[in-house]
Image (cartoon, rainbow, N blue to C red):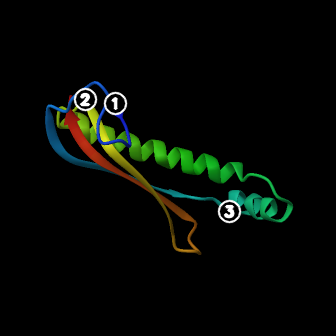
Amino acid sequence: MIITTTDGVEGRPVRQYLGMVAGEAIMGVNVFRDLFSSIRDIVGGRAGGYQAALREAREAALADMTAAAQALGADAIVGVDVDYEVLGKENGMLMVSVNGTAVRL
């Protein structure tokens, strides 16, 4: 499956538009990750725990979107948009949503 943020795949014309597909993932962030992230905020550096959580959420959302496109018989998803949100300041939930257009090339 080709996944791209552009509106097409170079050298491969779109033969059929199959519709919009999406995927979402909401991940909880644990108290230890929060604690170590707070320490990083004070001393500087990258918050590896949060980076790993974001990566895991993005991959899960992309997998859901890809499965939806495959169910439609697509061989590519074009115009992909990736959005990140924090759901509530106190609850430590991260949401990643992706959407794009399933196509046959």
x, y percent for residue 45: 79, 53
Name of the residue lying farthest toward the top: 11
Q: CA distance from mark 2 to mark 1?
A: 7 Å
Earlier sequence position, callout 3 versus callout 2: 3
Q: Amino acid at mark 1?
A: Ile
The residue tagged 3 is 31
Note whether 31 is above or below 74 in the view shown: below
Please give the count of numbered marks on the rendered protein.
Answer: 3
Q: Nearer the viewer, residue 41 or 30?
A: 41
Quadrant of the image containing the C terminus? top left
- Asked which quadrant contains residue 29, the reply is bottom right
**Measuring 21% from the left and 36% from the top, which residue is drawn there?**
103
**Measuring 58% from the left and 50% from the top, which residue is drawn there?**
53
Earlier sequence position, callout 2 versus callout 1: 1
The residue tagged 2 is 75
Circles 1 and 3: CB distance less than 8 Å? no
Circles 2 and 1: CB distance less than 8 Å? yes
